[in-house]
């Protein structure tokens, strides 16, 4: 316990890039028989903005739920940086536009607060009959999905063992598959963001054997490059609308002990 325990946590959370999530035994999705590529094809008569909004909200809800199951293990001491696979570090902009490193639980709290607030905004995600989607909805959706991708990347990199112990890794794989096929179909997240989990896209056969190569994704991205470049992104950091630091509570020794032995 104490110092030794913390050191071990830090090591296993942040410096270990073993990619447990690529192990054969955990490469399964919830709902394995469903081809998600069919589910993201927009039916005739559906408004594109409505389609974007409904999938975005679904991906947010599921990501938020999954993170909530392991948030007690995502601590400031265990996850002092917001990192993903291949040592990708995500930075955050404060309210004055200053780029800064923040601990993963803080970064994710900013993300979830921002997305929840945005989805609840009737002028951006209207729910009442007479209200229209704003012209810039796609830009907002792109930002939300990029931030949620960061959260998913952190879950894979730093908390996959806990998720396996809780038997929730198939759910994470399913949400990741949903986000990946949706992004592949509508080109909403830049390739430089998604490339760190491209190996998992291939391992899980998310896009099917026929079109599942990084090369094809690259070509596809190139095709949409002009559209993607319209988005005002700034490296891997993001401008929060509201920042209410509220780090997750720390503890629960029982499962933590199991995880140490995993
Ligand atoms: Zn964490």
Image (cartoon, rainbow, N blue to C red):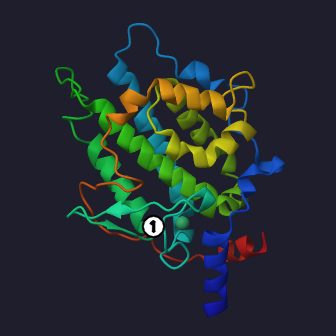
Task: Tell which of 170 and 12 is nearer to you.
Answer: 12
Task: Tell which of 101 and 243 is nearer to you.
Answer: 101
Which residue is at a point 54% across and 43% down the rendered structure image? 194
The reply to whether residue 1 is in sight is no
| Residue 7 versus residue 144 in the image, above or below | below
Assign the N terminus to one quadrant of the image. Answer: bottom right
Q: Quadrant of ligand 1?
A: bottom right
Q: Tag 1, which secondary structure?
A: helix
Assign the C terminus to one quadrant of the image. Answer: bottom right
| Residue 92 versus residue 228 in the image, above or below | below
Task: Tell which of 256 and 19 is nearer to you.
Answer: 19
Which residue is at a point 45% across and 31% down the rendered structure image? 55
Task: Tell which of 201 and 213 is nearer to you.
Answer: 213
| Residue 28 versus residue 9 in the image, above or below | above
Residue 256, x across and y down, in percent: 66, 74
Residue 57, x across and y down, in percent: 40, 37
Which residue is at a point 68% across and 50% down the rendered structure image? 169
Which residue is at a point 56% across and 76% down the rendered structure image? 78
| Residue 214 versus residue 38 in the image, above or below | below
Residue 182, x across and y down, in percent: 51, 29
Query: Relative to 122, is 2 on the left or the right?
Result: right
The reply to whether residue 119 is in sight is yes
Residue 142, x across and y down, in percent: 38, 38
Quadrant location of residue 61? top left
Quadrant location of residue 175? top right
Q: Which residue is under mark 1?
A: 105
Q: Is mark 1 within 8 Å of ligand 1?
A: yes
């Amino acid at each position: 316990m104490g110092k030794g325990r913390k050191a071990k946590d830090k090591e296993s959370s942040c410096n270990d890039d073993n990619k447990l999530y690529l192990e054969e035994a955990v490469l399964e999705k919830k709902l394995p028989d469903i081809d998600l590529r069919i589910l993201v094809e927009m039916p005739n008569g559906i408004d594109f903005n409505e389609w974007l909004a409904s999938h975005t909200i679904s991906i947010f809800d599921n990501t938020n739920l999954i993170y909530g199951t392991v948030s007690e293990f995502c601590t400031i001491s265990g996850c002092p940086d917001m990192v993903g696979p291949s040592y990708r570090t995500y930075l955050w902009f404060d309210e004055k536009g200053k780029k800064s490193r923040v601990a993963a639980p803080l970064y994710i709290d900013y993300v979830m607060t921002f997305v929840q607030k945005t989805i609840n905004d009737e002028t951006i995600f209207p729910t009442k009959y007479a209200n229209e989607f704003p012209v810039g909805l796609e830009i907002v959706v792109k930002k939300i999905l990029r931030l949620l991708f960061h959260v998913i990347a952190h879950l894979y990199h730093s908390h996959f063992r806990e998720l396996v112990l809780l038997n929730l890794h198939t759910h994470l794989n399913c949400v990741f598959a949903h986000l990946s096929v949706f992004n592949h179909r509508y080109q909403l997240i830049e390739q430089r963001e998604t490339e760190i989990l491209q190996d998992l896209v291939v391992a899980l056969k998310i896009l099917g054997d026929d079109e599942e190569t990084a090369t094809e994704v690259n070509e596809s991205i190139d095709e949409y490059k002009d559209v993607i470049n319209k988005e005002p992104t700034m490296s891997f950091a993001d401008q929060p609308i509201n920042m209410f630091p509220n780090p997750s509570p720390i503890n629960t020794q029982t499962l933590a002990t199991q995880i140490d032995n995993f």
